Amino acid sequence: MKILIVCDDESASSAILSPLREAGHAIDIVDRPEEADAVLRGTHFDGVVLDLRRDAEAGLEWLRSLRQQRVRLPVLIVTDADAVDARIGAIDAGADDHLDAPFDPRELVARCRGLVRGNGGIQRADIITCGELVVDTRKREVRHGSMPVELTPREWSILEFLVQHAGTAVTKERLLRAITGFGEQLAPNAIEVYVSRLRTKLSGTGTRISTLRGVGYRLEQPEDGVRPDW
């Protein structure tokens, strides 16, 4: 998944970025809330981590504006443990969850997973079945029957995106934006390389990634379709 961090403190943003990136997520960072609007207009994100420790009022004002525009992108706020007023204000403004600092990096990753899984109140399946392939988005695991399919973080991110958009065309540019984040650059042919490796690992599972010349890729729906297991 891809997450936008809104934080104006370099040390604090690094503490948020590092565990999320290590967990395999693509991350972008902006210093000020007003910068987030332009970034959100140009790129798809699965969630936002909004740090309110230095300028809570500016962050709250931006969050209110986001919700007034009926944007349901899930938002996790980070505050100091004693910042009760900021937490209450954020919840009233439309925050979906909160985390007190200092925090355990594992809790940050878990809360972001839960945040995106809930998707602002719209339930997303943890387990998606694609033919004989089982994709567990919570555990970030893929199985062919009872056998695990070992994927790198990049390969996982591409497969997750394609499965969630199964049957529809996905451009290379859109895939690239989905798997890269702040400070990351990939070679022009990186998507082709990752998709080629992914195809090899999915060989024999009944799941096929088609190349759409001049467009990008499409995960073909097997005869029994792609379905969430609720």
Image: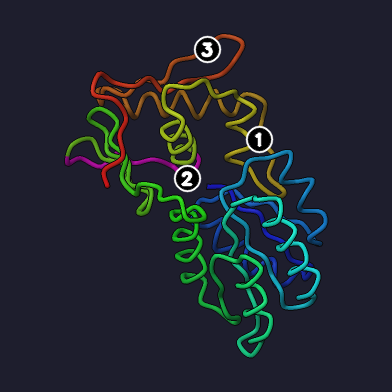
Residue segment shown in magenta:
146-154
* Kind of residue at badge 2: Pro
* Disc 1 residue crowd, few under 14, some 14–19, many 20+, Cα 10 Å: few
For label 2, the SS is helix
Q: Is residue 153 magenta?
A: yes
**Mark 1 sits on what residue?**
186
Q: Nearer the viewer, mark 3 or mark 2?
A: 3
Quadrant of the image occupied by residue 17 = bottom right
Q: Mark 3 or mark 1: which comes first in sequence? A: 1
Quadrant of the image occupied by residue 90 = bottom right
**Please, which residue is most extreme toward the left here?**
146
**Rendered view: 21 above or below 97:** above
The circle drawn on residue 153 is 2
The circle drawn on residue 212 is 3
Q: Which residue appears at 66% of the width and 54% of the height?
A: 4
Out of 183 and 91, give the one closest to the viewer. Answer: 91
* Disc 2 residue crowd, few under 14, some 14–19, many 20+, Cα 10 Å: some
Report how far apart the C-alphas of labels 3 and 1 lie in the structure: 21 Å
* Kind of residue at badge 3: Leu
Q: Which residue appears at 59% of the width and 29% of the height?
A: 190
Left or right: where 76 falls relative to 62: left
Left or right: where 185 falls relative to 160: right
Q: Nearer the viewer, mark 3 or mark 1?
A: 3
Q: Which residue appears at 65% of the width and 50% of the height?
A: 70
Report how far apart the C-alphas of labels 3 and 2 lie in the structure: 24 Å
Q: Mark 3 or mark 2: which comes first in sequence? A: 2
Left or right: where 78 falls relative to 114: right
Q: Which residue appears at 46% of the width and 58% of the height?
A: 113
Report how far apart the C-alphas of labels 2 and 1 lie in the structure: 14 Å
Q: Mark 2 or mark 1: which comes first in sequence? A: 2
For label 1, the SS is loop
Whole-percent x, y for residue 79 in the image: 65, 78
